[in-house]
């Protein structure tokens, strides 16, 4: 499953990292809700099977106007008054709005984020009163 909307990561010539070493994309195409990818040097079914379940990663990209999960995890969340609410432990996909999962389990829908200060590793949110009392 592709966890990125940047499908150019699967363009021919792209290099993905894995526990089994770097893999260079030879060809790729979407198929249903997945991608079929051919890698240089993977010539038969046995070689392809050896990659089953291997997690592939790619270097972070700077894309103007885009915010990535790695920029949020570890950030301090503050409200519009500057009160610290916690630290982002994870970002959870959710159909209505992705969720900032704070250490301790509180959930804040990403749609309440008003500002991201990358240099300060800070996320500013404008949440409805009582939201954190509803969360665990």
Image (cartoon, helix red, strand yellow):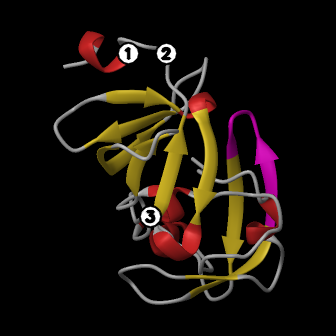
Q: Is residue 46 left or right of residue 1?
A: left
Callout in the foreground (2, 3): 2
Q: x, y (%) of residue 89?
A: 30, 50
Count of all numbered marks drawn on residues in the image: 3
Determine whether 126 is above or below 3 in the image: above
Task: Name the main secondary structure of what is drawn in magenta.
Answer: strand
Q: Are marks 1 and 2 in contact (CB under 8 Å)?
A: yes
Q: Mark 3 points at which residue?
A: 49
- Residue carrying label 1: 131
Q: Please report the residue visible at 44 percent of the width from the left and 64 percent of the height from the top.
A: 49
Tell which circle, 1 or 3, labels the residue nearer the N-terminal end.
3
The residue to which callout 2 is attached is 128
Magenta region, residue range: 28-34
| Residue 14 in the image: above or below residue 130 | below
Q: Check disc 2 and report its element: helix, strand or loop.
A: loop
Q: Does the magenta stretch include residue 29?
A: yes
Q: How crowded is mark 3: few (under 14 residues within 10 Å), some or many (20 or more)?
A: few
Residue 73 found in image quarter: bottom left
Q: Residue 25 or 14: which is nearer the viewer? A: 14
Q: Nearer the viewer, residue 47 or 58?
A: 58
Q: As drawn, is 68 to the left or to the right of 63?
A: left
Judged from the image, the secondary structure of the residue bearing numbered disc 1 is helix
Q: How crowded is mark 1: few (under 14 residues within 10 Å), some or many (20 or more)?
A: few
* Alpha carbons under labels 1 and 2: distance apart: 6 Å
The reply to whether the magenta stretch includes residue 70 is no
């Amino acid at each position: 499953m592709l966890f990125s909307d940047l499908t150019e990561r699967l363009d021919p010539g792209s290099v993905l990292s894995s526990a089994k070493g770097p893999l260079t994309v030879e060809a790729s195409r979407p198929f249903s809700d997945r991608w079929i990818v051919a890698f240089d040097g993977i010539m038969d079914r046995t070689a392809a099977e050896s990659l089953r379940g291997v997690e592939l990663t790619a270097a972070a990209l700077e894309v103007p106007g885009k915010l990535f999960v790695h920029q949020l995890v570890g950030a301090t969340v503050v409200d519009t008054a500057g009160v610290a609410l916690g630290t982002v432990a994870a970002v959870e996909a959710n159909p209505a709005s992705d969720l900032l999962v704070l250490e301790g389990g509180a959930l804040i829908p990403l749609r309440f984020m008003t500002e991201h200060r990358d240099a300060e590793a800070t996320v500013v949110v404008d949440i409805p009163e009582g939201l954190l009392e509803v969360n665990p």
